[in-house]
Amino acid sequence: MIKELLRIGSQFVGYREYAARAEEKLSEANERADALAQKLEQSEAARKKAELAASKAKVEADEAKAKAAGVEELQKKLEDATAALDEHKAAQASRDEGILKRLKSQSRRTLTQTNQDFDLDNPVNDPLLDALSLLEFHGREIREGVANASASLSALFPYFFPKKEEPSTFLALAKLFNSSEDLGLKMRQENMKVAVESTVALVADSQQTLDWMKVGDTSQIEHSRWRSLIKAAKPNTKKILAYLGIKPASTPSSSRPEV
């Protein structure tokens, strides 16, 4: 019985020690579980943080891609704009060269008509502007010439075209004087006709008896004798012209006598 009690006591002591060790191991296990739980919580937080960082990184990557695409597009636009600008510069240079050729051509053509050349006092060293300045000089010369010619032709118009109305434009007026007909010869002939009629009227007024058939027979007139008679009659022409109301010029006439 005593042995049984000793055995039971020993077992109790052993169980108590085992229980104490089990309790210690349980406590250690709990501590380890708490540590693991804490690590798991930290790991979860790290995971979430990593996921958030990854998400931000993805957004930033997408933004970077979009910006890169935008930069490429801007680069393409810049290249297109540069090419267009170069093309425009080339076209502008070609256009300026064409304008310069036209200006120089107009100046040369004007020079051949007016025989008046010009030199620029203060050139700007711009071929286009300098050519334009020269053409402006020629244009001013032409305007002055047209104004003077228009005034002269207007003054002469009533004498050459007494039955016509003067044109309103200089070009039409100039064309009238530039006809195929010799207007100067025609006017001289008209003046000679008037002179002959006036001479006949003067002779008739003098009440002299003339054989007008012989006077009118020009086939009997010799040119040399006719010129000598005209020369002899010149001293009396001033009186006749004064009678007709015409003031002769002071210089001797250089007109060629005509039959």
Image: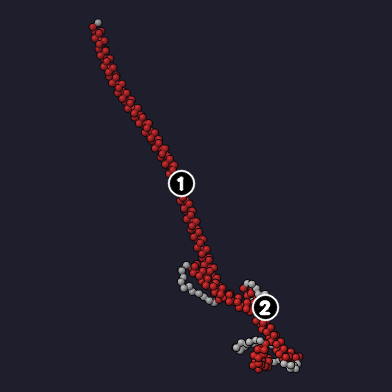
Specify whether 130 is left or right of 236.
left
Specify whether 249 is left or right of 129.
right
The quarter holding residue 157 reads bottom right
Which residue is painted at 46% across and 47% down in the image?
Answer: 70
Which residue is painted at 66% across and 84% down in the image?
Answer: 188
For marks 2 and 1, the one nearer the N-term is 1
Q: How many marks?
A: 2
Q: Amino acid at mark 2?
A: Phe
| x, y percent for residue 25 | 29, 21
Q: Which quadrant is home to the N terminus? A: top left
Vertically, is 132 above or below 180? above
Q: CA distance from mark 2 to mark 1?
A: 83 Å
**Which residue sits furthest top?**
1
The quarter holding residue 161 reads bottom right
Q: Amino acid at mark 1?
A: Ala
The quarter holding residue 220 reads bottom right
| x, y percent for residue 18 | 28, 17
Residue 218 visible within the image? no
Vertically, is 93 above or below 193? above
Instruction: Report the mark closest to the observer, 2 or 1.
Output: 2
Which residue is painted at 75% across and 94% down in the image?
Answer: 209
- Residue closest to the eye, 186 or 233: 233
Specify whether 51 is left or right of 222.
left
Residue with the mark numbered 2? 161
